[in-house]
Image: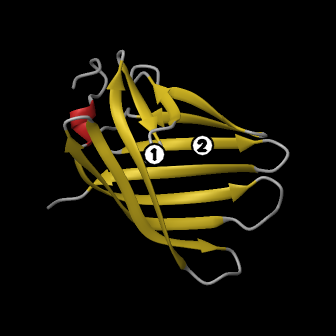
Amino acid sequence: MTVNSAVSLDDFVGEWAIERSITDKRGGPNGRFRGTAEFLADAKGLNYSESGHLILDGQSPFKAERRYRWRVVKGTIAVEFPDGRAFHSFDPASPTASHWCDPDTYDVTYDFDLWPVWRSVWDVSGPKKAYQMITDYTRTLS
């Protein structure tokens, strides 16, 4: 499942510790998330799942989860929602992408320069949302 010389889909397999910061650009509550992410391989690609606790300023922590599917499509890594709808795709050598979720735009940049530590930075903008979400991934030892 090699995509190119940057990183391949197989490089993600396993468990990762994740820490996330969420900064609301309109003065709403900021947040922090701490948990784990796991990439499990099957014949079609990788199943991504994360679970942990989210703390929004002024609120009690609560459990948060998300799931995606990652697979190679025409030399890129395609990220899909669990039901198969496209979310975004990126070339690991130039890892940026956008997703339009009417009426807001989600722009992401992945940073693999310190592999196997990596980062995603989401900048979300539009009439309903305006925030930046930075997630750091560190491989766990098992």
Indicate the quadrant containing the N terminus: top left, top right, bottom left or bottom right: top left
The answer to whether 94 is drawn above or below residue 82 in the figure is above
- Which of 96 and 69 lies nearest the eye of the viewer? 69
User: Where 56 falls versus 48 (above or below)?
Assistant: below
Looking at the picture, the colour scheme in use is: secondary structure
Mark 2, Cα crowd under 10 Å, few <14 / some 14-19 / many 20+, is many
Give the quarter of the figure containing the C terminus: bottom left
Q: Secondary structure at mark 2?
A: strand
Above or below for 98 versus 106? above
N-terminal of the pair, mark 1 or mark 2, is 1
Query: According to the image, label 2 marks what residue?
Result: 122
Report the amino acid beneath label 1: Asp
Q: Are marks 1 and 2 in contact (CB under 8 Å)?
A: no
Q: Is residue 14 left or right of residue 84?
A: left
**52 relative to 117 in the view: left or right:** right
Q: Is any part of residue 20 visible from this angle?
A: yes
Q: Position of residue 57 (x, y in %)?
A: 69, 74
Residue that label 1 marks = 83
**Other residues around mark 1 within 10 Å, as few (<14) / some (14–19) / many (≥20):** few
